[in-house]
């Protein structure tokens, strides 16, 4: 297991759709070792998730986990989840505005609209199939990571460029209002 370099915006791998992983490939020692590296890299960078193409490997695998994360203390906990070949679809039209950042877009945040309720179908690292409903900020995290696997960055989803801010300026001018609003949202939807 090791920490890999995270590629940043401008690298072509971030703009291509990652390819599906076969069951045989998933079971291989090479892919299992890669998944361990992906998890280590995500944790080392204090990310809420990390997609394979963010470390330069264009396969449809992402790791998601939120615990005591200093970057996102307002996010509800998500146990370590490895998603392979995920399919995500909105359940309804309800949207929420989330101020997002990304490990591949260092020191920049912006507001995006995300679906509040989504259905996610995926395989775990052992090839077990899941069909789950994700809600709230958890749904937003899954959408963000699945976007990566389609070559989409949060930058593409920002509809008002006036919401772009550095981390420093977000902390200084915008964080308190965002956290207050998002905590009310989390209390309402439960995740």
Image (cartoon, rainbow, N blue to C red):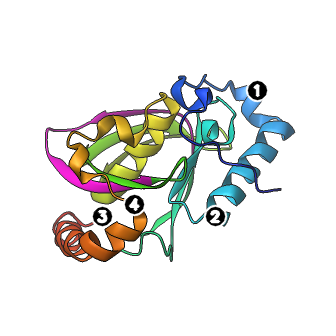
Query: Which mark's residue is nearer the viewer, 1 or 2?
Result: 2
- Looking at marks 3 and 1 on the same chain, the residue that comes earlier in the sequence is marked by 1
Q: Is residue 93 visible?
A: yes
What is the quadrant of the N terminus in the image? Answer: bottom right
Looking at the picture, does residue 157 appear above or below residue 38?
Answer: above
Where disc 4 sits, the SS reads loop
Q: Which mark is residue 94?
A: none
Q: Which mark is residue 166?
A: 4
- The alpha-carbon separation of the residues under discs 1 and 2 comes to 27 Å
Residue linked to disc 2: 43
- Looking at marks 4 and 3 on the same chain, the residue that comes earlier in the sequence is marked by 4
Local packing at callout 2 (Cα closer than 10 Å; few below 14, some 14-19, many 20+) is many
Residue located at (27% from left, 55% from top): 98
Task: Tell me: 136 left or right of 81.
Answer: left
Query: Which mark's residue is nearer the viewer, 1 or 4?
Result: 4
- The alpha-carbon separation of the residues under discs 3 and 2 comes to 21 Å
Query: Which mark's residue is nearer the viewer, 4 or 2?
Result: 4
Local packing at callout 4 (Cα closer than 10 Å; few below 14, some 14-19, many 20+) is some
Give the camera-side residue of 128 and 51.
51
Q: Which residues are magenta?
A: 83-101
Q: Would you say the residues marked 1 and 2 are in contact, meaning their CB atoms lie under 8 Å apart?
A: no
- Looking at marks 3 and 2 on the same chain, the residue that comes earlier in the sequence is marked by 2
- Looking at marks 1 and 4 on the same chain, the residue that comes earlier in the sequence is marked by 1
Q: Can you give x and y, in whole percent of width and height, for residue 58 in the image?
A: 64, 29
- The alpha-carbon separation of the residues under discs 4 and 2 comes to 22 Å
Q: Can you give x and y, in whole percent of width and height, for residue 104 in the image?
A: 55, 46
Task: Tell me: 165 left or right of 126.
Answer: left
Which image quadrant is residue 39 in?
A: bottom right
Residue linked to disc 1: 24
Q: Would you say the residues marked 3 and 2 are in contact, meaning their CB atoms lie under 8 Å apart?
A: no
């Amino acid at each position: 297991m090791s920490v890999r370099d995270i590629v940043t915006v401008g690298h072509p791998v971030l703009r291509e759709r990652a390819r599906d992983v076969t069951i045989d490939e998933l079971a291989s020692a090479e892919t299992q070792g890669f998944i361990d590296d992906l998890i280590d890299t995500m944790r080392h960078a204090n990310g809420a998730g990390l997609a394979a193409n963010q470390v330069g490997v264009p396969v449809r695998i992402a790791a998601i986990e939120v615990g005591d994360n200093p970057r996102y203390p307002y996010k509800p906990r998500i146990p370590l989840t490895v998603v392979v070949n995920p399919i995500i679809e909105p359940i309804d039209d309800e949207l929420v505005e989330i101020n997002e950042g990304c490990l591949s877009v260092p020191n920049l945040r912006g507001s995006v609209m995300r679906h509040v309720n989504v259905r996610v179908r995926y395989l775990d690292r052992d090839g077990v199939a899941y069909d789950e409903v994700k809600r709230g900020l958890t749904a937003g995290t899954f959408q963000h990571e699945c976007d990566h696997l389609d070559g989409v960055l949060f930058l593409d989803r920002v509809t008002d460029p006036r919401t772009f801010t550095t981390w420093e300026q977000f902390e200084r001018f915008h964080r308190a209002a965002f956290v207050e609003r998002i905590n009310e949202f989390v209390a309402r939807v439960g995740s």
